[in-house]
Structures are given as structure tokens and as C-alpha cells.
Image (tube, rainbow, N blue to C red):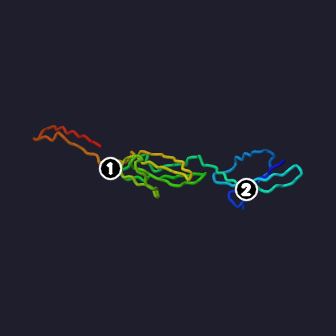
Amino acid sequence: KEYEYIISSDSNFNSSVFTGKTSDLSKSISSIGYGTYYFKVRAIDNYGNVGNWSDAETFAIADATKPELTISGNPANWTNQPVTVSANATDTESGIKSLLYSLDSGKTWNDYTNAVTMSKNGWIHFRAIDNAGNVTTKGVLVNKIDKVAPTITISGNPANYAKKATISMTAKE
């Protein structure tokens, strides 16, 4: 006895993903990607008589892989200018459903459409969600923005003329 099977990604079986024959009552296929599939089977007896195809059955392969998320633009050197922080999300299984960002440690999330300009130091978090619902969240601390000009204090201004005067200066950031 032998079984012939067909697996398709469309319910009309216009294109097949796998076809084959086996004498086993179960078949394991490991090289199939994320998605919904349809299969049917028919029996072939020892004399070569072929039975009718079974009704189509459905199964799904779930995406269990979290999206990849990369963040760029956090300056390594001090600047007195705003910085632009960017994110990129990829998912080779089911694809990216949404990419979000938060400037308040995840209390509220906004749709990420363009790089985010930060004019002061602080955390920015990004969240990528794939079409299967898997989530990756990452954050970076932007801490190299310095917009405060240094101050200087001068003391020791003598009230009268003298042969020697002492003046002290202190600079503060």
C-alpha cells in the first residue's frame, strides 16, 4: 500500500508546494515556510489501483521568530545640535506589521514613519511587531546633547590701584 499526497498554498491546488508518495502513515516536512497550507491524500493499493483524493484539510505553520530591530543615530561624541535617531525592522517569516516608537518609556507608542529628532537627552524606545504578533522592543539612551553654554566667574577685582592684583576665574559647564 502506498499514499500519494499533495500540499498547496492555495485551496484549489492550482500550485503545489510538495507532492510525493510514501508508504508511511505520517509524513514530516521540515522545509516549509510560514503560512496556511492545504493537503489531500489518496491511496494506491498493491495492484496499482488508485483511490479518489481525500477532502482537502488545512494546516498552518506559525511564525515564532521575533523581528530583527536595529537602531542608529545615537551620537558617540558630544554635540550641541539635535540628533536624529532611526530604526529599521525586518522579519523574514511573516513580515513587519508595525514599527512604533516611544519617548516616555513605553507608556504611549507612536507610529514610526520617519527618523525621530531629539533635541534633548533622554530614552527612545522602538517596538517592532510582525504579522504573527511576535514583538521586539529595544531602546537607546541619547546622552551626548549639551546645549548649555559654559559660564565663567571672575573674582578679585581690586578696589584701589596696587602693585599686584590677584584675579581668580572659575568655569562651569
Q: Position of residue 142 (x, y in %)?
A: 40, 46
Which quarter of the image is occupied by the C terminus? top left
Q: Is residue 159 left or right of residue 167?
A: left
Identify residue type, mark 2: Asp
The residue under label 1 is 147
Residue 165 got which mark?
none
Q: Position of residue 54 (x, y in %)?
A: 75, 55
**Element carrying mark 2:** loop
Question: Residue at the location (69% across, 55% down)?
Answer: 38
Please tell me which of labels 1 and 2 falls first in the chain.
Answer: 2
Q: Position of residue 164 (x, y in %)?
A: 16, 37
The residue under label 2 is 55
Q: Is residue 85 left or right of residue 29?
A: left
Please identify, in this view, whether the residue under mark 1 or under mark 2 is nearer the observer: 2
Question: Residue at the location (51% across, 52% down)?
Answer: 88
Q: Position of residue 126 (x, y in %)?
A: 46, 49
Identify residue type, mark 1: Lys
Q: Is residue 78 left or right of residue 91?
A: left
Question: Residue at the location (12% across, 39% down)?
Answer: 162
Q: Residue furthest left?
A: 160
Given residues 90 and 23, the one toward you in this image is 23
